[in-house]
Amino acid sequence: MQRDHREQLQQSWQANADAWAAAVREQRIESRRLVTDAAIIQAVLALQPKRVLDIGCGEGWLCRGLAEHGIEPVGVDASAPLIEAARAACDGRSQYRVCGYAELEEHAEQLGRFEVLVCNFALLEEPLQPILRSLHGLLAPGGSLLIQTLHPWRASHGEPYQDGWRVEDFVGFGEGFQAPMPWFFRTLQSWLTLIGETGWRLEWLQEPLHPESVQPVSLLLLLKPL
């Protein structure tokens, strides 16, 4: 069953690539526009890295934003159409590669080492233990892993507060989305357990708030190797 969900998730990003790129570039998603985009950029800049690996980079918005601050960003994503969109918008200061989670470890030598690894709303699969363990091989000495994900309390939407597969139908994101996306919901306890199981230590946790509702929009985690 998990394999079916993972395949559907990957197929969704292939089918929805153009619609997603348009939604991001036209700033249709309120939570991103008001809160989460700025939160992840500020968190990266505070670490003052030279090189950043954006894992699940999508159409490349974060790489472009970091390049404006003199950082050397590399973006990887399993969706070839999204990488094509990222390259089309690239001014030469970012690099992009079609690369899924399963391939990251074998591509580590070509990718090199990074002071910061970023997973910005990119850890939607189950299981995550293999990818989180493999990321250690991409980290420069003293480096950090930044994860921004859906806030478990907000994302539960009244459903039982327990781990499990959910479905995103992209309502409110604009037109052109052709397929719903399965994603795996995790409680806060599950996130913290997962971090420890995969050789990471939590440095800090932030809960970026919506400026009007003053409710948490996302969960932002800074991790260091154990």
Image (tube, grey):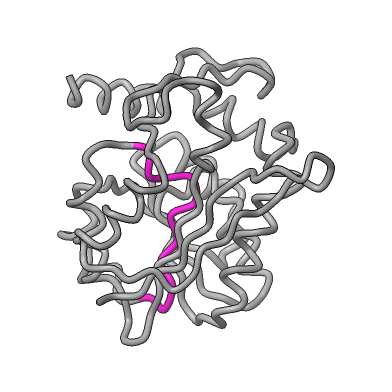
Name the residue nearer the viewer: 105 or 107: 105
Quarter assignment of residue 208: bottom right
From this viewpoint, which residue is outermost toward the bottom? 141
The residue shown at (57%, 46%) is: 88
- Magenta region includes residue 40: no
- For the N terminus, the quadrant is top left
**Residue 153 horizontal side relative to residue 174, left or right:** left
Name the residue nearer the viewer: 121 or 61: 121
The residue shown at (54%, 40%) is: 85
Position of residue 159 relative to residue 147, above or below, is above
Q: Position of residue 217 (x, y in %)?
A: 64, 43
Quarter assignment of residue 13: top left
Query: Which range is magenta?
Result: 114-124
Magenta part, dominant SS: strand
Q: Position of residue 24 (x, y in %)?
A: 65, 38
The residue shown at (27%, 53%) is: 194
Q: Position of residue 166 (x, y in %)?
A: 40, 22
Name the residue nearer the viewer: 21 or 220: 220
The residue shown at (66%, 31%) is: 23
- Magenta region includes residue 122: yes
**Residue 66 horizontal side relative to residue 142, left or right:** right
Q: How many marks?
A: 0
Q: Position of residue 212 (x, y in %)?
A: 84, 42
- For the C terminus, the quadrant is bottom left
From this viewpoint, which residue is outermost toward the top? 178
